[in-house]
Image: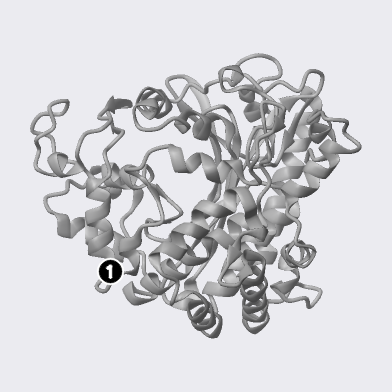
Amino acid sequence: MSSPSAVSTTPIHDRRQLVEYLAEGGKPAAEWCIGTEHEKFGFRFDDLRPLDYEGPRGIRALLEGLTRFGWARVEENGHLIALTRGGASVTLEPAGQLELSGAPLETIHDTCCEVGSHLHEVKTVADELGVGFLGMGFQPKWKREEMPWMPKGRYAIMRRYMPTRGNLGLDMMTRTCTVQVNLDFADEADMVKKFRVGLALQPVVTALFADSPFTDGKPNGYLSYRSHVWTDTDPDRTGMLDFVFEDGFGFERYVDYLLDVPMYFSYRDGRYVDLAGRSFRDFLAGKLDALPGTLPTLRDWSDHMTTAFPEVRLKRYLEMRGADGGPWNRLCALPAFWVGLLYDATALDAAWDLAKDFTPAERHALRDGVPKHALKLPFRGGSVRDLAQEALKIAAHGLKRRARLSPGGADESHFIEPLIEYAEADQTPAERKLELYHGRWNGSVDPVFREFAY
C-alpha cells in the first residue's frame, strides 16, 4: 500500500496505475476492518439555529474545545477545519455538520465504543457552549438560505457548480446527514459480489433508517427526504450504477466510470484549483487548460474518487451510503447490518441469493420508491418490509457465526435489534416523528431538538 506522501506525489501516466491503486485495497479476511462515519447537525439551545463557524458558540470553538481530548488540529488557510487522533478524524460538512470518520476497527463492539466516546466528548464541550447535536437525515427546521457555510476551499467550488447540475445539490451539501460504513474486500471477485449485494439491498437500509420527514418546519411528504435529495443533485455522479451488475464488471470498469465523472478540483500548492466539469481523462493526457502540461498525481485520483456519490462507492474499500443519520443505537446498527451480510461467506451467499434476480427496473423502483414509502413500498406481491426482515435474519446469523464477543460474552447480533424492531412494527423513525408532530408536538418540529438531541 502506498504511503500518504507517495499518494500525494506519484504522477499518473496511464489508466493501469488507477486500476492497480484500487486493486491494492484487497486484504485477507483476517485483516478486514470496519470504518464507521456519521454526521450530525449542531444547533444553539436558545434559538435552535445552526452553528456558524466563528463566534463563542461556533463550530470553531467546538473543535478547539475537543482538542483537550488529544485531537490534533488540521488547518486550511488559517482556519481550523478538522481534527485527527489515531486513525480517526473529526471533519466538517459544508454547513458545519460535524462528522466522525472512525478508525478502522475489528468489531462492532469497538465501533460502538468509539461512537459512544466521541458523542461523550462532543457533549462535554457542547454543553459548555450552550449547543447541542441532532441525528436526523435532513435539517428539520431551517431553510437552505439560513444555513451557514464552512471556510473550506473545495466547498466553495462545489457550491458554484452544484446548481448547474441539479436543483437539490445545495440542500445535499448543507441540510443532510448520513451514517455510513466502510468495509474491506479480499480481491476483485469478492469486491464485485459485495458491491452488487450492497447496491441491490441499499434501498432496504434507506427504508429502515428513514428519518427525514420534515423540511422548513413542516412534513415534506417523504420518510427519507435525504435519499430523495440525491435524485436531483447531479446525475453524473449519483445513482444505482447498473453496470456493476453486468458481466465483466471489476476494477477496470469502475475506473472507466470514474474517468467519466466530471471533476471538481485539484489541490495544488495549498490551494484548490477549480476544475468543475472538466475531464479526468484530459487531466491524464496533460490537456487541462487550468493546469497546462500537468499530469495528475495519485492524490488527485484519491480526491476525485471522493467526488462520485453513488449509493455504494468503491475506493480501496466499499462505502455503504444509503442511510439517514440517527441516534447512537442506529450508528452502531448500520455497520452491524452490513458486516453481518458481507463479512460472513454463508451470509454473503444468502444475501446474493435474495437479490441476484432483481431486474434493473426493480432495483430502480426500489431506490426511487423508498424515500417516500420506506418499508411499505410494494415489492413482488409483498413489501420492502418483507425484504428487510429477510435481510435482517441473514445479517443476524452472519453476526452470530462471526462470533466476535464482547468482554461480557455477547456476540454482535444484538446491535441490529433496533432495526428488527422497526421492521416488526412496520414503522420507521420518520413515521414515529410524524406521529409526534401531529400529536403531542402540536404541529411543531421544535421539540425534536430537545427530545432527540445526543
Which quadrant does the C terminus fall into? Answer: top right
Three-letter amino acid code at the position of disc 1: Phe
- Point 63% across, 53% down: residue: 373
- Looking at the rendered structure, the secondary structure element under dot 1 is loop
Q: Quadrant of residue 389?
A: bottom right
Disc 1 residue crowd, few under 14, some 14–19, many 20+, Cα 10 Å: some
Q: Position of residue 41 (x, y in %)?
A: 66, 33
Left or right, 75 with respect to 403, comes to: left
- Point 67% across, 27% down: residue: 62
**Depth check, front residue: 207 or 84:** 207
- Point 82% across, 19% down: residue: 46
Question: What is the image's colouring?
Answer: one colour
Which quadrant does the N terminus fall into? Answer: bottom left
Q: Quadrant of residue 27?
A: bottom left
Q: Residue furthest right?
A: 440
Question: Does residue 316 lie above or below 306 as drawn?
Answer: below
Q: Position of residue 367 (x, y in %)?
A: 50, 55
Left or right, 377 with respect to 297, comes to: right
Q: Is residue 327 visible?
A: no
Q: Position of residue 333 (x, y in %)?
A: 68, 61
Question: Does residue 396 lie above or below 429 as drawn?
Answer: below
Q: Residue furthest top?
A: 55
Q: Position of residue 424 (x, y in %)?
A: 77, 67
Q: Quadrant of residue 39?
A: top right
| Label 1 sits on residue | 249
Q: Is residue 126 visible?
A: yes
Left or right, 52 with respect to 267, comes to: right
- Point 48% across, 58% down: residue: 365
Q: Residue furthest front?
A: 381
